[in-house]
């Protein structure tokens, strides 16, 4: 126990001193800059307020993005330029074909399923009196890490060797309809779909909460007016509710598309990318940190960026339009 | 009229209320059962876990704290000889500064972009918003190089090696960098909507930007800051990619999530330590989440719906 304390206390001391130093430096700079009057004050304020963020963003995101693009044209060690070789490798290697196909499937299937279930729940919850308990429970997986979620679902998908008792929930449920026990994680493409279930499970709460807020914001006089005109059921939803939450719907869909593109943790924990379940973000990590091929890994990262870019452009156009209002 | 208001408006009846309740209840059960199964299993003995499904406890209730005891105090397996507690501590040590640093820096930048404004500040705002989509994966290697060998232009050393690799600072820094785009965007939305008269009155009274920031902007932004703090807490605590890259797997600095992931890799079916380990890992985020859910939702909404 004293051993535990002797390693733990210095760690907490580190939190304490680093935060203290951080605020001391800030207060010191603010104090000095606050005394400067006249024309120097404005530029000084800009430098102090925006400078730290600018430096961190330049070294953390801007310059790394540029460097990665350069690396994608270099060899494994990042020394010599080799033109488009990494990109031709990407399009010719069969493993990467699987990776790309899987990524495309992830990007198409998971956002649609997630948003559809989220929207259904949001509409149904709008009709219920006691909505907070189901809402909390469905939203709960958002607080759980993908690693934690993967373990929870690994347990559901668990398979024991023949001759041992089967304790996995999925195996026992499928037995009820007369199926023999399977090792779910080995069967392609079923295993990919089972991994997608985890993503949907985590993300649906997000879609539900956002869409639910949007539906509640639809002015009730509009709904009532169209109800007086005889609209009800699906017709009301199609003609009134959905058009009014469409922009929110698109935002949720786009967020999930980006999430599915960058997905890494679930595949890493569930299968390590084996058995035909690999995706872009995981393969990229494997190329750089397992194969030590920086060039190929960087090319995959650039591919990832190019796939996200259209969504980014859409979002910026959307944001600009909003800000002009 | 009062009577009409107290009843559900007829037009809202897209589905009947009973149908809605049934469907929602079914989905809620499907969503809860996987977590419940693992939670129940974490209190069962190893023999029971492998012999019968967890639903067996409803027939024959039998519980033990053995798994938690092993995972907390060691002896679960060789790689966990000191227990999981040191990793839990590491997660706390990583998370607290990795929430505070980006929040302060982002609030300052958001104030600058919203109220000091300068040529190009609008462009910068869009540019920072756009940075949200740079995949983290693109930044990992360049940042690692910054830590270990600094920045060179040609053969001239411009910035020396930071020497933070393998230390807590080496995880705080990337987390701070990666959090900034979203944080600045969200906080800017909030801070820009503060009343203009307030700022002008303060300027007339002779307050400078530093004073306004400390006395007006910071206190008024607390709700937005709190919302993002929860967001960032969950993100850092649950992160795997950044931690895998910048913290080695050692007991010195590796967070609990990395340890948990490695337990899966090595002992795929050692459910006694995995069930308890998973619950120790997700306990804190769940507590934070359930107690502060309202603020968290507010933060989510600010980010997605305008």
Image: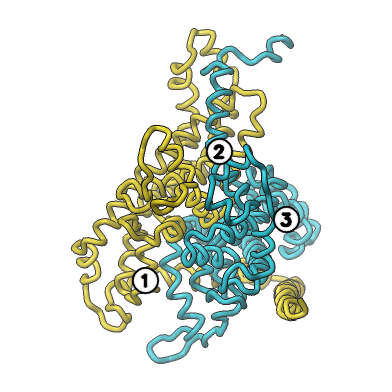
Chain colours: A yellow, B cyan
Where is mark 2, residue-wise? A210
**Chain label for disc 2:** A
| Residue at (64, 16) in percent of width and height | B8
Give the spatial CA distance, label 1 vs label 2: 35 Å
The quadrant where residue A219 appears: top right
List x then y, in percent, for residue A144: 58, 52
The quadrant where residue A130 appears: top right
List x then y, in percent, for residue A113: 42, 38
Where is mark 3, residue-wise? B217
Q: Is residue B143 left or right of residue A100?
A: right
Mark 3 Cα shell of 10 Å, populated few (<14), some (14-19), many (≥20): many
Q: Mark 1 or 2 closer to N-term?
A: 1
Mark 2 Cα shell of 10 Å, populated few (<14), some (14-19), many (≥20): many
Mark 1 Cα shell of 10 Å, populated few (<14), some (14-19), many (≥20): many
Q: Nearer the viewer, residue A96 or A43?
A: A96
Above or below for A9 versus A321: below
Quarter containing the C terminus of chain B: top right
The quadrant where residue B236 appears: bottom right
Q: Nearer the viewer, residue A228 or A252?
A: A252
Q: Nearer the viewer, mark 3 or mark 1?
A: 1
Q: Are marks 1 and 2 on the same chain?
A: yes
Q: Nearer the viewer, residue B206 or B187?
A: B187
Where is mark 1, residue-wise? A68
The secondary structure type at the circle numbered 3 is: helix
**Chain label for disc 1:** A
Any part of residue A1 in sight: yes
């Amino acid at each position: 126990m004293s051993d535990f304390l002797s390693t733990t206390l210095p760690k907490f001391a580190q939190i304490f001193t680093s935060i203290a130093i951080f605020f001391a430096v800030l207060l010191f700079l603010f104090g000095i800059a606050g005394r400067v009057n006249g024309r120097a004050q404005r530029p000084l304020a800009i430098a102090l307020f925006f400078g730290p963020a600018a430096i961190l963003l330049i070294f953390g995101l801007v310059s790394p993005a540029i460097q990665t693009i350069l690396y994608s044209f270099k060899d494994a060690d990042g020394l010599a330029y080799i033109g488009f070789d990494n990109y031709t490798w990407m399009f010719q290697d069969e493993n990467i074909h699987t990776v790309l196909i899987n990524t495309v499937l992830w990007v198409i299937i998971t956002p649609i399923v997630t948003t559809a279930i989220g929207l259904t729940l949001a509409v149904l919850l709008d009709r219920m009196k006691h909505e907070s308990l189901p809402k909390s429970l469905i939203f709960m997986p958002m607080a759980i890490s993908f690693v934690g979620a993967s373990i929870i679902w690994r347990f559901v998908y668990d398979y024991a060797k023949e001759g041992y008792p089967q304790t996995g929930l999925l195996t026992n449920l499928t037995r009820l309809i007369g199926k023999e026990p399977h090792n779910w994680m080995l069967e392609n493409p079923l295993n990919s779909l089972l991994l997608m279930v985890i993503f949907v499970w985590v993300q649906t709460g997000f879609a539900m909460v956002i869409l639910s807020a949007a539906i509640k914001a639809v002015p009730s006089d509009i709904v009532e007016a169209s109800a007086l005109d005889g609209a009800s059921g699906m017709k009301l939803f199609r003609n009134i509710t959905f058009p009014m939450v469409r922009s929110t719907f698109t935002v949720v869909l786009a967020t999930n598309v980006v999430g599915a593109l960058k997905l890494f943790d679930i595949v890493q924990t569930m299968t390590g990318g084996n058995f035909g379940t690999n995706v872009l973000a995981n393969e990229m990590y494997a190329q750089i940190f397992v194969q030590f091929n920086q060039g190929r890994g960087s090319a995959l990262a650039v591919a990832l960026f190019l796939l996200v870019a259209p969504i980014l452009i859409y979002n910026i156009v959307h944001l600009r339009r909003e800000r002009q209002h | 009229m009062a009577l009409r208001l107290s009843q559900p408006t007829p037009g809202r009846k897209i589905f009947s209320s009973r149908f809605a309740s049934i469907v929602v209840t079914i989905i809620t059960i499907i969503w809860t059962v996987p977590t419940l199964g693992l939670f129940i299993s974490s209190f069962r003995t190893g023999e029971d876990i492998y012999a019968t499904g967890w639903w067996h406890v409803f027939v024959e209730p039998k519980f033990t704290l053995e798994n938690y005891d092993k995972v907390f105090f060691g002896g679960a397996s060789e790689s966990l000889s000191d227990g999981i507690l040191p990793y839990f501590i590491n997660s706390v040590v990583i998370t607290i500064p990795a929430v505070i640093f980006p929040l302060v820096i982002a609030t300052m930048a958001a104030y600058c972009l919203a109220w000091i404004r300068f040529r190009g500040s609008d462009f910068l705002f869009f540019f920072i918003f756009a940075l949200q989509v740079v995949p983290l994966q693109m930044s990992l290697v360049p940042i690692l190089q910054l830590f270990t060998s600094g920045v060179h232009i040609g053969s001239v050393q411009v910035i020396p090696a930071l020497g933070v690799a393998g230390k807590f600072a080496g995880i705080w820094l990337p987390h701070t960098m990666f959090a900034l785009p979203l944080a600045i965007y969200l906080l800017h939305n909030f801070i820009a909507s503060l009343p203009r008269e307030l700022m002008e009155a303060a300027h007339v009274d002779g307050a400078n930007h530093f004073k306004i920031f400390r006395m007006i902007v910071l206190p008024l932004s607390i709700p937005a800051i709190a919302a993002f703090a929860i967001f960032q807490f969950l993100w850092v605590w649950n992160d795997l990619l950044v931690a895998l890259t910048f913290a080695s797997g050692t007991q010195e600095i590796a967070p609990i999530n990395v340890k948990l992931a490695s337990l899966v890799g090595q002992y795929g079916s050692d459910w006694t330590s995995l069930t308890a380990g998973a619950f120790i890992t997700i306990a804190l985020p769940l507590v934070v989440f359930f107690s502060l859910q309202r603020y968290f939702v507010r933060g989510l909404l600010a980010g997605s719906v305008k």
